[in-house]
Image (cartoon, coloured by chain):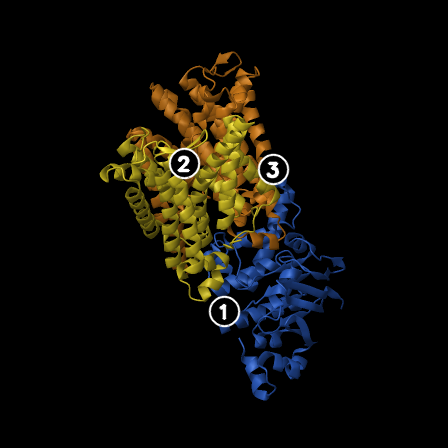
Chain colours: A blue, B yellow, C orange
Amino acid sequence: MSAILDVRDLRKAYAGVSALDGISFAVEAGSITGLIGPNGSGKSTAIDCISGFQKLDGGRVVLADADITGRSPHLIARAGLTRTFQTVRIYERLSLRDNLAIATQQFDPATWIDELLRTRRYREAVAAGDSRARELVALVGLERYWDIETGVLSYGQKKLVALAAALMPRPRIVVLDEPVAGVNPTRIREIEAALASLNRAGETFLIVEHNVEFITSLCHRVIVLEEGRKLAEGTSAEIHADSRVLEAYLGTTSEIAAAEMRATA
Amino acid sequence: MNIDALYLVQLTLNGLMLGLLYALIAAGLSLIFGVMEIINFAHGELLMLGAYAMAFVLPVVGLLYWPALVAAVVGVMLAGLLIYEVLLAQLKPEEFERSILITLGLSIVLIHTMQLLFTATPRLVDTQYGFDGIEIGSIRITWTRVIGAGAAVGAFAGLYLVLHHTQFGRAMRAIAQNREAALMVGIRPRSVARNAVTLAAGLCGLAGAAISPIQLVTPYMGQFLIFKAFALVIIGGLGNIPGAIVAALVLGLIESLIGGFFEIVWQEAAVFVIMILVLFLRPDGLFKQGGMRVG
Amino acid sequence: MRQLALALVVALAFAALPLLTTSNYIVGVGVSALIFTVAAAALNLIYGYTGLLSFAQLGFWGVGGYASALTVVSFGGSFWWGVIWAAAINAMLAILIGFPMLRTSRHAFVIGSLTFALLATLVARDWVDLTRGPLGIPNLPPPSAFGIAFDTTAKFYWIAWAFSVAMLALLYALCSSRIGRTLIAIRQNEDLVRAQGISPTPYKLSAFTISAAVTGAAGGVYSFHLGIIDPTFLDFYYMQTFLIIVIIGGTGSFWGVLASGIVLSALPEALRFSADFRMIIYGAILVLAMFVMPGGVAGWFRDRAIARQREALG
């Protein structure tokens, strides 16, 4: 398996304080990789920079052999990297179907002329989009809401919508920013199951999370950040046993700390 | 050469006084924007109310300038307080367009109510000073202008003191610089906003009262000035009070000088042309945006 | 589909207005209603759909009015060319000022748009060589085509009718297309739109340009209805009218704004209040609407529909 996403030596500073201090890691195609770390470790900044929403001061981001460093967010999305946001972002006043249709709009070949003349290309694009949308909607169990404005959904359901939208254009990698933050435990298990199922079907994920238990049960590899630097990297088991990681999270090395870390949500 | 120099001095003095007037309006607008992130479309009407208040109070106090001025300013501040409580208090910072439409509606209601009640006939306001003034050579400045300018300068000094040496003033600067941080340390946005609107109204009321003896008072007088004030706030950088004041003073000078040597159309268009240029080159305003950094 | 059929019926009914009454006054109100509705629908495109509160519409309206008048009076063209020029010039202006303005913050955009409108007013009043200044250009000749002179209010009404139907059809096609849906998405969450591979700026610029062209064309037609163009054509009253129509109808609702435009244009005439009183009511409605019905009439219906859906889903 080769690396679908390769970030090297990311650097970013705000007003003299460095948020990213030379972070490098790679995400294998077809894997679920976790990115964890205490508050202020640079997780959110890292993915904002990777996805183009913030500017890097230094470093490179390579997506499937294409250098996407410094590109605008929409170009990075077109290159095959989609993402969700920490504060769930969906189009609350549009239906579930429309939410998903927009997510794939840029990626189908139909232009406005096609739409105006209702050409076959347009009709086929819409049909393909709808069929993919129905697949994803079925996966996350939201079929009843197909034509309903997503604003009526619960917080957890909106997170599922955001996830489905990020998957619509068949991206090379999906970056999830705290997908289960603020979500109730039952829903967390649903999301975990959905992600595992999608991964078995070939999707690649990079997940940023605070919920260490979620990450360790789902991810093949985990990368731990601390204060803008990569602290450790390995499988979940390796990370759990790593005393540096435990110390970073709680300042102590002990079984209790390990248990506390598992319970962190 | 002598005459030209004196002409220039006259123009400069006029320009400075004009600039002070613009600055009073623009500073208030900038203050409100910095604290609430809304643009007050009814700001010009607060000035108009100050002018009308002056027009009505003066005859009652025997044309004495200062009592009338104080009464007018206090009156407009109360109006500002009322406007805040009734209309603006529930607005959130993201509701920019909604705030514009609310204040626009208020502006329409105020202008046409005044017109309905008092007609559009321009009023001449007389004070104890009449048309007396001081003369320096062939330059003549009326007392009303001098005192008006002095009151404006005094108001800015007061504003500076309030923003830097009182708690509620510092709270205003805190919210303007970093809203989230300010909220986290317990600054209460509603009382800060209330204070800001009242203060801004006071500045406008002062401007209106000060120019009422100088310029004809009509229901539309605020309208002519407010659009320039909007442009000044953009040029200075939204939320940047010193920036707005500097821009206002410079504009006053530029307008006066242009008006003295070129056609009127350029004088009027000057501010808008400058604003468009600024938007082209420095979309965040000439000075750094947001936060009331003084100096 | 049912909506379109209904709209077609209503459109035909409107075409019949001059046949139903001999009052020039009423037909004149009809012309205003149609043209104002078009301008409001254009404002809805840039504000209701895309979320950009553009006061520049007033400027485009005025430039359009002058463009068509000058085409006929100063350049010897026909009314039809005048309207086309009105649209074209405003489209170019929109691209020119849209570029810098769309790069700035929302706040600066609104004020910049206001400034453009004011500059247009200043030019109309003070650039006497071009616009004839405060006196304006009176006695605009009635349009003619194929030897027919549209010199009565009733005949002009049909021009206004055909124009409005065409413009509204164009806007409807746009608003109900994927482009319209993307504009709505941009208004709601621009960052999400970017994260989905769409660059918002071309969409915003297109919406701005199209709304400018349509508004300009509307102004170009209206100046000939008035028979005179002067700086009062750029009076803020027109902007307020368009705004109130959009807000009462419901921002982002095509049919809501359409209905609102017809009703709100006809209503003040029916009520015959004094100008000041009418404006006070306008202002009060504006303020009240922002508190009670920020989504307008259409928004109120939508909220009820959603509440019902919520109940049904349990």
Chain letter belonging to callout 2: B
Q: Residues within 10 Å of mark 2 (few under 14, many from 20)?
A: some
Q: Is residue C94 visible?
A: yes
Q: Quadrant of residue B166?
A: bottom left
Tag 1 residue: A182
Amino acid type of the residue tagged 2 in the rendering: Gln
x, y (%) of residue C22? 34, 18
Q: Distance of mark 3 from mark 1, alpha carbons?
A: 45 Å
Q: Is residue C6 visible?
A: no
Given the current orientation, which residue lies at the most extreme bottom position?
A255
For residue A210, above or below residue C226: below
Share a chain, discs 3 and 1? Answer: yes
x, y (%) of residue A180? 54, 69
x, y (%) of residue C287? 35, 44
Tag 3 residue: A117
Tag 2 residue: B223
Amino acid type of the residue tagged 3 in the rendering: Leu
> What residue is rendered at 51% in x and 23% in y?
C66
Chain letter belonging to callout 3: A
Q: Nearer the viewer, mark 3 or mark 2?
A: 2
A58 vs A209, nearest the viewer:
A58
Chain letter belonging to callout 1: A
For residue B176, above or below residue C67: below
Q: Residues within 10 Å of mark 3 (few under 14, many from 20)?
A: few
Share a chain, discs 3 and 2? Answer: no
Judging from the image, what secondary structure is the residue with disc 2 in? helix
Judging from the image, what secondary structure is the residue with disc 3 in? helix
Q: Earlier in the sequence, mark 3 or mark 1?
A: 3
Q: Distance of mark 2 from mark 1, alpha carbons?
A: 49 Å
Q: Look at the numbered discs 3 and 2 and tell me whether their residues touch, using CB distance below 8 Å.
A: no
Q: Look at the numbered discs 3 and 1 and tell me whether their residues touch, using CB distance below 8 Å.
A: no
